Image (tube, grey):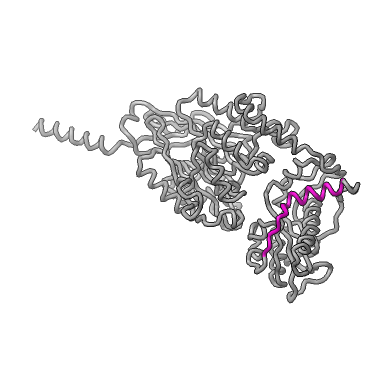
Amino acid sequence: MKVLFQFLLLLLLATAACQSPPVSHRLQHFEIIELDDPDLADTTLLAYIQPYRDSLNEAMNEVLVHNEERLIPTKPESPLTSLVADMVLEQGMAFIHEASLPNHPAVALINSRGLRSPLPQGKVLRRHAFEIMPFENVLTAVLLDGRQTLALFDHIYSENGDGLAGATCDFTPDGTQNIRINGKALQTTAHYWIFTSNYLAEGGDGYSMLSEADTIISSSYAIRDIIIEKLQAYASANKKVPHQFSTRIKDLR
Amino acid sequence: MNSRRSFIKKSLAGAALLAFPLSGEAFFKKESTRIVILHTSDLHSRIDPFPKDHPHYPGKGGFAQRAAQIQKIRKENEHVLLFDSGDILQGTPYFNFYKGQPEFELMSRMGYDAATLGNHEFDNGLEALNQLLPHATFPFISANYHFENTALKGKISPWKIFQKGRVKIGVLGLGIDPKGLIADSNYRGMEWSNPLETGETTAAYLKQQGCHLVVALSHLGLQMDRGRYDDIQLAAHSTNIDLILGGHTHSFMERPLLTQNAAGKEIPILHSGQHGVQMGRLDFEFGSKAEESPYQLLNG
């Protein structure tokens, strides 16, 4: 009987071992390490970075223009979103002409969130243009009918505004009203060019009505290059970078 | 929205008490194993530190500074794992000029163990990402981005298992729905699947493979609107994910957020801010010591 009991006990232990007894894990320590001492840097990595930084700095420190007032990108609209939208509208018109595309009233649309940094006061460097527009987006022309254009303005409202040029509208508690393109009320029977980035043209930020259009034409103009060239053009023409802009979105909410 | 916020606060209040029983080997009874997990996210090509006069992050960040910290932690600890939750790329002219090569090479030198793909990894398209991958010696993992019909076929693993001493850590990657976020032409051919379901299926598989801890590297965002899945939903849907290391929303946390999973257990979610101005560190202890006082967070 004793032997049998010992055998059963052994069997029980063996089975228990096979079943793998539970093992705990415990979060014993956590830490949010602030990396706030740039002097404590790994020298091997610094040496790796140096040549990249040097050639980058040379290119990026080129002065594009002197700017009198800092321009910021905010919603529903702001000096910087209006400035960039104006630049895109001008380039878009040139593109339509070069590409021999049909003439229609045109609107430029730039998403505020796509402009990642302010245009600084004082020397504007090539670096700043990259910080404002880090993305490799290109100017894209989208042809919308009147109803699609209405949907576009409804979406601009639900986005709490974006950079506009060539059009004005009112934001009321009931939505977008009083949409005017080239100074004329929007007509549902008309067609309109929307000059924007390929990101929005492909439906980014919820602008699905753009991606659903029948005519979407990409240009080879990077939005950032448009910004750089237009800023340089102000400098070479001895003109100031504008800092006051007409109201495009009248906020009546 | 308000109730969700107060729920997060309550979860934070409970963060001092943590314990996670798991199945494992008998030899864990004899000694414990400590694994240090380091985490970054949304580095956005911030190779250099911010300028010393920067209004928000004066002198903070920079890849070389992070490397020095990582090296120090590796010297002090036997088992260290270093992960990134995506959006390594885009945000400074380094990316515009060099297309991501220095970022990947520097992170390889730092000894990153794995990263998941953020939406900005696609900014120059799939072919550019394909050209860039050989510059990373660490794997990119994603369980819910499917590349079978693209140039990246076979180059992105859904998960990876790390053996650290006697501990097996399973890591899976989860990516955000690209629709409306990444230009269509930049991910053409890639399929996306539901991260909540794919995440849980993959985590269950990793547990079957004997992993003692399953980590989700997520680029879903901590808390999203407009019907997008997020890390809080991921935790609530899962029973097999033990830790979520997240990104995309650039969220700064003072401590890991504890949130209930589908089995009613609390699991930590950690986001480590943005631009490499911070690095998250979580130390897990496996084995007998943990069993002696399972409900005590020793420090932090």
- Given residues A151 and B226, the one toward you in this image is A151
Q: Where in the figure is residue B221, as x and y percent of width and height?
A: 57, 48
Locate the C terminus of chain B by quadrant. top right
Q: In the rendering, at what x and y percent does residue A248 appear?
A: 81, 60
At a point 80% along the width and 42% down the height, the residue shown is A120
Rendered view: A60 above or below B228: above
Residue B121 drawn above or below residue A50: below
- The residue closer to the viewer here, B22 or B96, is B96
Provide the major secondary structure of the magenta segment.
helix
Residue A161 sits in quarter: bottom right
Q: Residue at x 54, y 43 (%)?
A: B246
Q: Nearer the viewer, residue B16 or B23?
A: B23
Query: What stretch of residues is rendered in magenta?
Result: A216-235
In reply to whether residue B239 is colored magenta, the answer given is no
User: Residue A42: image x %, image y %?
Assistant: 61, 25
Q: Residue A74's spot in the image, x, y percent?
A: 75, 51
Q: Residue furthest right?
A: A238
- How many numbered discs? 0
Q: Quadrant of residue A185?
A: bottom right
Q: Is residue B256 visible?
A: no
